[in-house]
Amino acid sequence: MSNPKYKWIGTRPDRPDGADKVTGRARFAADFNLAGQLIGKVLRSPHAHARIKSIDTSKALALPGVKAVVTSKDFPEQADLTVPAGEMQVNLRDVTRNIMAREKVLYEGHAVAAVAATTEAIAKQALSLIKVDYQILPHVIDVAEAMKPGAPVLHDHLMTEGAKPPATKPSNIAKRIEFAKGDTKAGFAKAEVIIERSFTTQAVHQGYIEPHAALASASEDGQVQIWSTTQGHFQVRGFCARLLNLETSQIRVTPSEIGGGFGGTTVVYLEPLAVRLSQKSGKPVKMTMSREDVFRASGPAPGGNVHVKIGAMKDGRIVAGECTVEMQAGAFPGSPVGPACMCSFACYDIDNVFIVGFDVVSNRPKVAAYRAPGAPISSFAVESTIDMLCQQLNMDPIDLRLKNAATKGTKTAYGVTFGVIGMVETLQAAKDSPHYKTPVKPGFARGVAAGFWFNVGADSSAAAHVGEDGTVTVISGNPDIGGSRASLALMAAEELGVDYDKIRPVIADTASIGFNFVTGGSRVTFATGLAVVNSVRDLIRDLKGRAAKTWGVDPEGVIWENGMAKPAGSNVGTFEPLTIAQLAATAGKTGGPINGHAQLNVTGAGPGFGVHVCDLAVDADTGIVTVGRYTAAQDVGTAIHPSYVEGQLQGGAVQGIGWALNEEYIYNAQGRLANPGFLDYRIPVASDLPMIETVLVEVPNPTHPYGVRGVGEVPIIPPLATVANAVARATGLRMLDLPLSPPKLSAALDAPRPLMAAE
Amino acid sequence: MAKIHVTTTINGAPTEFLCDPSQTLLDVLRDQLGLTGSKEGCGSGDCGACSVTVDGRLVCSCLVLAPETEGAKVETIEGMAKGDKLHPLQKKFVEMAALQCGICTPGFLIASRALLERNNNPTETEIRYWLAGNLCRCTGYDKIIHAVMQVAAEMRESAK
């Protein structure tokens, strides 16, 4: 199914890093070692909330083999300054407190000290010798509890931003935001059907298989090198510079291959500690998190409480929507409540919308981005409510959505008016899919839901260098998390008119290419792709100049076609075309090395829409859900490498299925995480799933030369409601709280059901 | 504590190492022998990223004590390709995009080979249950299962 418009785009060649990744040769963060390195370990809080009265590190420091110990005293205080981190915003005053607790520990697992020693065993022993005197404080885990007057307050300085009326005393509500369009009061007055429900979801972890790891080497002259697993090595550099008072040019960060991330590795945890330990010890320091550390101390995605009210006419036309989202931020402000609000109703063209969001802190690890941050939570609530509307009006769930679908010109509640989008096309594609056309098997029921993500552009740099033999290296600065090297090389080959295997894509460290924003927000193939295309265009301009010089004609007299310079017309003269190899061979005489480069702030990310269909069966005795068939349809713009686009849809869908059915952070009465391992925090395994069918709908993004839209985020949004809607239809039971785990579902199935009679 | 001297065979090569009695095979492979293709995703036998075979038996190397490999034959991902020739599973995983980030890939390849050595005609369900001890967070398993089915079919074809 290659794209007829192009030679390379839409084909499925082997990825450039394929051989390395199937042989064990690819180097992930924990695979980096330096001679003489020390092993760093972190001491973590056993308490959910406590004041640190004192820390005595003297015994640890006296242990033979221990070379350095750091606490918050080793990190300078930071200003109250908010900076972007991935798709989220973080405050530097909070970041320095998150990497190393200062006045208080705010969650179980919060770092309080770190040591570097000659062996891991000595480092671990040293941790046990550090004496921390804690004054235990009352804690609060649940968001609704944290919002109540009288709840334990985490931060004495936290006054609710945007509160109406303005806040007069500190609370756990960091921020109130609001989006409005039209007049919901009038909308609901007109509505013939109104459905209103409250939903909850639990915190879930991104679950990347590679634990966080970093190796840092600080030299006596102040230079610092870092090797770490990250979605943004430029962000690692930026954070370390800020948190350690270093100049960015002194820090060189080399990203390892990255073992998953999904947004969770757009922030720093270990890197600043490893650098500080290396500065103090004079040796390289390597640090890795255990899986337990990853669960307890690295950012999960938040849980949230969502209240939804939808008003519609009897023909299925939605006339008003209201939504209130209360979202966990973790220990510090900065949940993705903004995107959750923005995405809640964005699939639909609704005249009257009112959305309120609250960013709420509690004694949990600080949340981090996770694939379309926030959107799955609000979408679960809205799409479940819409499904109830379909049931009540006895309408097909795709037809009702088609009746309300956003199109070009639809104004969203958050102010943006859509350009060319593919919501209608995606709904239609789902409706026309082999899956939807097949009747549901006996014993199974079918659920449908949609999802929206706005996608991200931002800063990217790229360069294209011609080698002496005419082959081309394309250099960019975004860690390849799921095949982006292949998609960048395909676009470069298409643009330059040469074969895919003549292009070698390389991901450079922070000192070897200009700034790049993180790998996140579904931006790399779109934004860094555009930087690559522009760098190749710059290279072509250079190549045409060299041909002009060779022929003694004006540069305007040269065109570039099929990887060769040719005279623009017979009036220019008669010359044999020149290949890149020929131009490279004579480069010394025509101006030296032949390179192109580009750097830009990319705007115009094309929004993406997805529609998922799920057939499942529920075992009434055990509450176990069996997913029998699953299809993900999505507007992907142009599929540059369709296999990796399908992979994004499949992987995102399965993460969403896990979120819907099993995954959750479970806390005990002491505020400690009860399931910090893959055995008890159960992500989907192969035997839980069927094949995930995909339908790639190509509505090109007009702002990108190849029509690229980001594709990675959208697929995690629809599954939560898709699964819950299917469960509702299978059991007659509308579950409002995720996950739909076997114990929860079987208990609900056994309970009396007064609600159902009213529906 | 006195180190234990272990004599073993790793990817066909006679190998000796000294280790602590409590050291895992994974730690020895990665930290002492430089075989970092086996990955530590959990250290508790839940993720399968450290899968190797010991005397043909598929194990999580994080759950095997290194001294247990005395006299045994250990196979890791580094021994899967022969010279410059990838194993059919390795080739197919790349061809069919059965990996995204690639951290779980060595474990899946070792586990898949162990399956196909026992059963060259597994059903989709058999493959899914055999690989249920290997976690992948990127792919949703779809393309991995397809790749293993495809290799099994090609193996049966060439065995005819």
Image (cartoon, coloured by chain):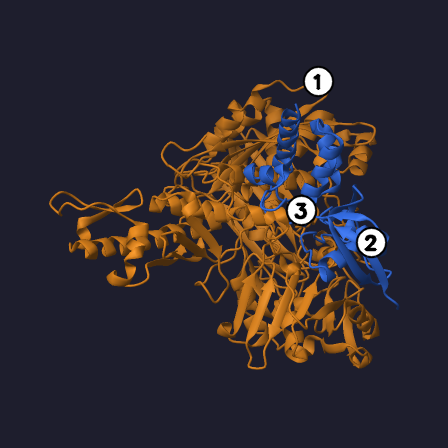
Q: Amino acid at mark 1?
A: Pro
Q: Nearer the viewer, mark 1 or mark 3?
A: 3
Return the residue at label 3. B106
Q: Give whichever of B35, B125 is nearer the camera.
A: B35
Image mark 1: chain? A
Residue at left offset 45%, top offset 40%: A640
Label 3 crowd bin: few (<14), some (14–19), many (20+), radius 10 Å: many
Disc ID at residue A442: 1
Q: Position of residue A321 (x, y in %)?
A: 55, 39
Q: Amino acid at mark 3?
A: Pro
Image mark 2: chain? A
| Count of picture labels | 3
Disc ID at residue A668: 2
Disc ID at residue B160: none
Label 2 crowd bin: few (<14), some (14–19), many (20+), radius 10 Å: few
Q: Secondary structure at mark 3?
A: helix
Q: Give whichever of A192, B107 is nearer the camera.
A: B107
The chain in blue: B
Q: CA distance from mark 1 to mark 2?
A: 40 Å
